[in-house]
Structure formats: structure tokens, C-alpha cells
Image: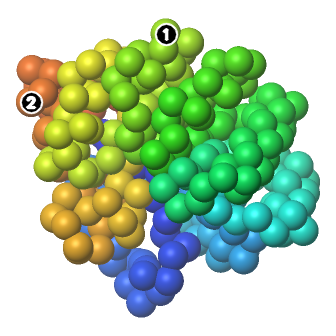
Amino acid sequence: MIIDVHCHLADKEFNQDLDQVIQRAKDAGVVKIIISTVNFDEIQKADRIVQRYKDYVYLTVGCSPILFDEGEIKRIREFIKNNRDKIVGIGEVGLDYYWVEGEQREIQRRLFKEWIVLAKELNLPLIVHSRSAGKYAMEILLDDPPQKVLMHAFDGKCGWAKKGEEAGFYFTIPTTVVHSIQKQNLVKFLKIDSLMLETDSPVLAPVRGERNEPANLKYALETISSLKHLAQEETAKIIAAATTNFFNLEV
Ligand SMILES: [Zn+2]
């Protein structure tokens, strides 16, 4: 029983064969999938996917940290407020220092703080993107944390991850854990109870350059189990319990 808590099935990469992708996920033991959106246009499409695979696919709505169109951001926020019961979280949102510098980083920090306020207001989990900005995202979050925080594909230092863990934040381990030493270290460093699984499909595939899909979650589970010296079944059970509790899902 494994759950992919973060992927992008509304991405055009899945336009042709989504039914098969979902079937392969089910065959691989994936019992639920949570999809993430990064702009306004994606929301409608993601919503249709959620309707089509009801009680299997769930929705989080967010905004890419490199989206700076304030009109579009406002429309995304309105959608979230008006559809509070349709979604299981806000995200991904956050910081991305890999792509921007200087003043744009400042704007990202301001917008990120506004997303934190919204998550608190609506009492929704916040799914945080923090590429090349782990420390900065963590500082902002720890200053005034929302109720539930999930750090997605965290690439910061283990010390900062630890501070997050101490504050009750969760971390999703992506499928790249099969080859990424940084992700393997994160798994070793954090407690098994703080971890969840994600593919971030269509990216972050276990094999570099390939299209990723939720069925590949099993490879992340294998790696995590061996790093934690646990049976796969036991690992899956612990992680699924944390995940269903965090997102209020019924399995
Ligand atoms: Zn993502």
C-alpha cells in the first residue's frame, strides 16, 4: 500500500496514455495519487482528472515559485478559497533560487509568506518546493509555521531538514532516491515516521532522462526500506499511516 503524494498528471506528457499510466500505478500497488498544479490553466485539467479517477486521484492546488503574474496568482488563490472542500492541500508553492536571483528572490519570499497565511486560514496542508533554497524556506516556515507542512523533494542540508522534522514537518522522498546520494542521506538522517513518497512525475525518474510515472514509486520504497533496514511491507505501512493521517484520506 503506497501513495504518490506529489506528481503532475495534468502535464502534457500524460495527454496520450493517462488511462494506462493509472492502470500501471494500480498494478504496482499505488493505492492513491495526489496531483499538484503549478499554474491556473492546469487546475481545470487536473480537476477533470480527479473527477475521472474519483477516490483514487486527489488534488492539491499551487503556484510555481517562478510564476510572478500577480493576476494569475490571485485567480489561483480565489479558486482555492472557493473550492476548499475539493482539494487536499495547497501546493506546490515556495522558493526556487535555482532559477532566479536578487529582487525576484525577495518577491518569492513575500509570496511564499502569503501562501503560508492562506494555508493557516483554510487549515490545509502546505506542500513546499524549495529548490536550492532549503535553508531560506525553512527559516520562513519555522518563523510562523502553518498546521501541516510537507517539504517536497528537499535538496537542502540535513541540518535544516532536522529542524523541520523537530517542528513536525514531513518530507517526501522522490524516486531519484535510487541514485541521489543527497536523498539517500536525507532518508538515513530523518525518522521513518517523517517520510512520505513521491514521484514528481513526469520528472525525477529513477532512470535519468526517462518520463517518470506513479508506478515507479515502488523503486523509492525499495531503496528507503533497505536504507532503513526494514521490510518493504513494514516501511509501506508506516508511511501510508502518516500520509493518510496528514491528508485526511480514507483507504
Ligand atoms: Zn512538483
Task: Name the residue at 49% across, 35% down.
Answer: 134
Q: Position of residue 201 (x, y in %)?
A: 39, 64
- Secondary-structure class at tag 1: helix
Q: Position of residue 184 (x, y in %)?
A: 20, 34
- Secondary-structure class at tag 2: helix
- Amino acid marked by disc 2: Ser
Q: Position of residue 158 (x, y in %)?
A: 34, 23
Q: How many marks?
A: 2
**Mark 1 CB within 8 Å of ligand 1:** no
Question: Vertically, is 151 above or below 91?
Answer: above
Task: Name the residue at 51% across, 41% down.
Answer: 133
Taking the view exactly as shown, the residue that stands out farthest to the front is 102
Task: Name the residue at 32% across, 16% down.
Answer: 191
Q: Which mark is residue 166?
A: 1
Q: Is residue 51 visible?
A: no
- Marks 2 and 1, how far apart in space? 24 Å
Question: Vertically, is 174 above or below 206?
Answer: above
- Discs 2/1, front: 1
Q: Between residues 224 and 165, which one lies in front from this camera angle?
A: 165
Q: What residue did someone put label 2 on?
A: 226
Q: Is residue 99 visible?
A: yes
Q: Between residues 227 and 101, which one lies in front from this camera angle?
A: 101
**Mark 2 CB within 8 Å of ligand 1:** no
